[in-house]
Image: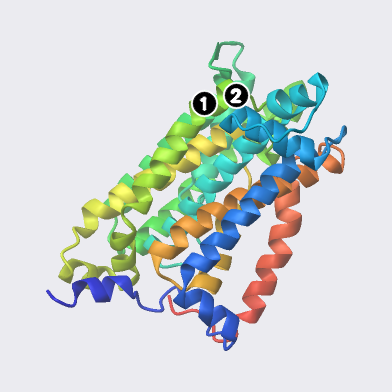
Amino acid sequence: MATDSRAVARPAETLAAPVVRLGRLELLRRRPALLAAGAVVGLAVALVAGVALGSVAVPPDQTVAILLHRLLGLDLGVSWSAPAETIVVDLRLPRVLTAMVVGTGLAVAGATFQGLLRNPLADPYVLGTASGAALGAAIGVLVPLRWLVLEFGLVHGLAFAGALLAVFTVYRLSRTGSLGTLTGLLLTGYAVGSLLAAGLALVMYLSGQNLRQIFFFLLGGFDGASWLRLAAAAPIVLAGVLAIALRARVLNAFLLGEETALHLGVDAQRERAILLGLASLVTAAGVAVSGLVGFVGLVAPHVVRLLAGPNARAVLPVAALFGASFLAIADLVARLVGEVPVGVVTAVVGAPFFLYLLRRARTGYEL
């Protein structure tokens, strides 16, 4: 069909943000490269700030010089001390990069779930991913067995497995019901998530002195970040993000509705399963590293869609950059205010901001 590419490239306003009559926003929608360039600059600022600031501050010029020297082999002619290089390279840089990788994965997974389910309130945990990961981690805390592979222990492994198992269970159960596919997914996800939450409550009740460790996982954090753990998790997250981005055209087709997607030649059942699997895999890998971190996958795609429009080809890469910057800055704030869990910071910042965005949505959403 001659009109296929046009139809897919300009998805219906199913998930579109409310119409904004501001010249600057219209310019960004016409030229998403400008928005992407701004997001790249913001990412660079977040990286430098996250590495430079902390209990022991490293001057920005030294921070940039160390990063360029170690990452690109460039010499800016700036001198620095050995302790400063240790702080930047061995302590802070892996933590900041881990936060960015997790933020990228959660933001892209959120954009995928919102587009696939045609629901602007969907987040990476909508199919019970969070509940499955939390229950798996809690069981890992209670099991009297300790092993470590690539700095991942039993808690991280069971969290990853629990997240994927929960999503697989939700998907299989939703296909056996009589409800519509999307409605069945959402309702089954809620039911399975509630059941897993009850199991988590029971495990927490039995945990005794290990309750603090479970709470720490539930609130999220990057205290255990390291180069080895980043090297193990980053390929999974980034490969999943890339695979989702390559299916932006398919995601645009789903925004038009499942019947329209079928008319455009999209194998709806197959592509839905692939996108759900990829988004869930990315989410599970991020959760295994950081614990549960909310609002990143909810706010980041929503903000980008408000600025760039609903086209997944623009939303996915810019949301990835925005999510990485957002979580890196949130982790920086968490460190500066006394090593509080990063999930607390994202909730404090994300919840009011998301309510503000919803308040601006005067025209509402057509789901």
- Quadrant in which residue 142 is drawn: top right
Kind of residue at disc 1: Ala
Residue shown at 49% from the left, 35% from the top:
285
Which residue is disc 2 drawn over? 227
- Quadrant in which residue 257 is drawn: bottom left
Q: Residues within 10 Å of mark 1 (few under 14, many from 20)?
A: few
Whether residue 208 is visible, yes or no, is: no
Residue shown at 23% from the left, 71% from the top:
5
- Residue 231 shows which numbered tag? 1
**Colour convention of the picture:** rainbow
Kind of residue at disc 2: Trp
Residues tagged 2 and 1 counted as in contact (Cβ below 8 A): yes
Q: Nearer the viewer, residue 176 or 214?
A: 214
Image-based side of 356 in relation to 362, left or right: right
Residue shown at 69% from the left, 50% from the top:
45
- Residue 114 shows which numbered tag? none
Whether residue 36 is visible, yes or no, is: yes
Q: Position of residue 242 (x, y in %)?
A: 38, 46
Q: Nearer the viewer, residue 28 or 169?
A: 28
Decide: is 223 above or below 263: above
Q: Position of residue 299 (x, y in %)?
A: 60, 61
